Image (spheres, grey):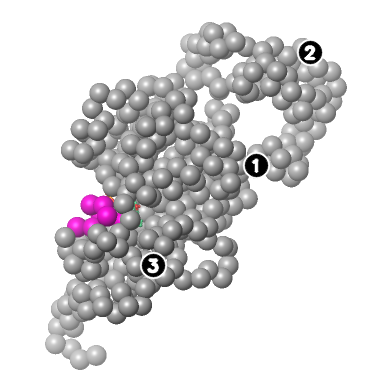
């Protein structure tokens, strides 16, 4: 059996080999550590022969096992899984690729900037570019923009293909930020959609879930670990009469990430979510600002949320399944059960704030329902 292994040094490689595979093998031939240039040469050869990029590894070795099934079963052992595939630190240095959906605006753009400052390669996917993104990305060879619609699944393959073309690799990390907030084309109360289902669900729910599944496939295929962080919202923990569809989509993400808590030992991919309160971004259009009584002084900055996402992506202390709230009151890891309500302004749960803003909040709903009554009496 031939085994490829990744580690930092020849010493580390030998330790890893002995610890990882020693007990499974009946006879071990000397492992060969590959220098970077040897590995690159082998990688090129493999690519020419198969058109597939080589997995990243530091060395390879052959050994005999009693039965292949024994070897495979040893990897299913829960103790092996939890010790070998526990969360690890994923520092976003110049060897790492971060894929960001919705990276041309708001929180996604702030994340792109901070990750680029750390030295990471950044792949930005967005429906459309923005002047702020253009002027920041100009001249940066570590930033790649790929126009894409995350509700159109073939565009995900376009993203992975562009990543392989530019960096000959798949992402190490994912900041899944693209989202919409009860836009005019997909809105519970205004109800403009009659045929194909809610576009808001496609963008806010199906896109993060499907991209996470693809991240798992890509990581397994390339033999590398990955860290995925999805933006949910405090709207994923509480409700709002004005945005029931949006709240439902964000609850879906919290439920999805909680469900994946025990998955990392099986996949090597860590999945977390961040739940911000109000953030000052273009998501709040003028009509939304009025309806939700938006004030800058009760809103987080996009960079605050981006910093929280970088912590979730990079630090092993935030394990798979972490649900992390960020509001004007600070940050907290949300427990699995018995969650205390957030109290800060900008969370939609502050009583004084809610009472003051109730009329503006429900005004457009009342108006719409009145138009549907058409003179009938309820
Ligand atoms: N702003 C807030 O108060 C707030 C609070 C909590 C959570 N969030 C969440 O944060 C995330 C980022 O939002 P933001 O506030 O930075 O808003 P934003 O509008 O500045 O950014 C969202 C980005 O997603 C992109 N996008 C939308 N639909 C897309 C599609 N189909 N394909 C590709 N890209 C698409 C947009 O073009 C935009 O660049 C969203 O998921 C949002 O729900 C925002």
What residue sits right under mark 2 in the picture? Answer: 29
- Give the number of the mark in front: 1 or 3: 3
Q: Would residue 155 be visible to someone looking at this image?
A: no
How far across and down, in percent of the image, does residue 177 sit? 36, 47
Q: Residue 44, relative to residue 328: is it above or below?
A: above
Judge the density around disc 3: few (<14), some (14-19), many (≥20) Cα neighbours within 10 Å. some
Q: Residue at x 77, y 36 (%)?
A: 74
**Residue 344, label in figure:** 3
Q: Which of the two residues, 372 or 139, is positioned nearer the viewer here?
A: 139
How far across and down, in percent of the image, does residue 187 sit? 26, 64
Q: Would residue 294 be visible to someone looking at this image?
A: yes
Give the magenta range.
279-285
Quadrant in the rendering for residue 344: bottom left
Q: Earlier in the sequence, mark 2 or mark 3?
A: 2
Q: Residue 88, relative to residue 365: is it above or below?
A: above
How far across and down, in percent of the image, does residue 252 sit? 45, 60
**Magenta span main SS:** loop
Judge the density around disc 1: few (<14), some (14-19), many (≥20) Cα neighbours within 10 Å. some
Cα separation between marks 2 and 3: 62 Å
Badge 1 marks a residue whose secondary structure is: loop
Q: Residue at x 74, y 29 (%)?
A: 20
Check if residue 120 falls in the magenta segment: no
Side of 352 where 9 appears, left or right: right
Q: Earlier in the sequence, mark 1 or mark 3?
A: 1
Q: Residue at x 27, y 55 (%)?
A: 280
């Amino acid at each position: 059996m031939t085994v490829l292994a990744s580690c930092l040094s020849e010493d580390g490689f030998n330790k890893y080999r002995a610890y990882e595979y020693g007990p499974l093998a009946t006879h071990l031939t000397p492992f060969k550590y590959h220098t970077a240039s040897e590995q690159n040469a082998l990688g090129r050869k493999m690519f020419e022969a198969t058109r597939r990029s080589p997995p990243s590894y530091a060395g390879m070795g052959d050994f005999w096992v009693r039965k292949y099934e024994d070897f495979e079963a040893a990897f299913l052992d829960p103790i092996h899984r939890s010790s070998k595939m526990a969360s690890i630190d994923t520092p976003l240095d110049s060897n790492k690729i971060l894929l960001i959906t919705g990276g041309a605006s708001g929180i996604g753009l702030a994340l792109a900037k901070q990750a680029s400052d750390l030295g990471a390669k950044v792949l930005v996917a967005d429906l459309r570019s923005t002047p702020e993104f253009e002027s920041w990305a100009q001249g940066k060879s570590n930033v790649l923009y790929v126009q894409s619609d995350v509700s159109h699944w073939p565009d995900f393959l376009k993203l992975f293909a562009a990543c392989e073309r530019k960096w000959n690799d798949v992402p190490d990390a994912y900041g899944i930020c693209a989202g919409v907030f009860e836009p005019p084309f997909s809105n519970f109360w205004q109800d403009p959609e009659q045929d194909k289902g809610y576009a808001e669900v496609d963008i806010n729910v199906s896109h993060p879930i499907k991209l996470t599944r693809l991240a798992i496939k890509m990581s397994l295929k390339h033999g590398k670990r990955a860290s995925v962080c999805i933006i949910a919202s405090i709207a994923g923990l509480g409700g709002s009469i004005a945005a029931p569809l949006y709240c439902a989509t964000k609850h879906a993400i919290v439920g999805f990430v909680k469900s994946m808590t025990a998955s990392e030992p099986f996949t090597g991919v860590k999945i977390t979510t961040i739940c911000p309160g109000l953030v000052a971004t273009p998501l709040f259009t003028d009509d939304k600002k009025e309806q939700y009584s938006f004030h800058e002084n009760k809103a987080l900055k996009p960079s605050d949320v981006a910093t929280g996402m970088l912590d979730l992506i990079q630090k092993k202390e935030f394990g798979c399944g972490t649900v992390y709230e960020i509001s004007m009151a600070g940050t907290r890891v949300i427990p699995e059960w018995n969650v205390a309500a957030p109290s800060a302004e900008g969370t939609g749960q502050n009583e004084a704030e809610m009472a003051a803003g109730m009329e503006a909040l429900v005004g457009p709903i009342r108006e719409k329902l009145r138009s549907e009554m058409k003179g009938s009496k309820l």
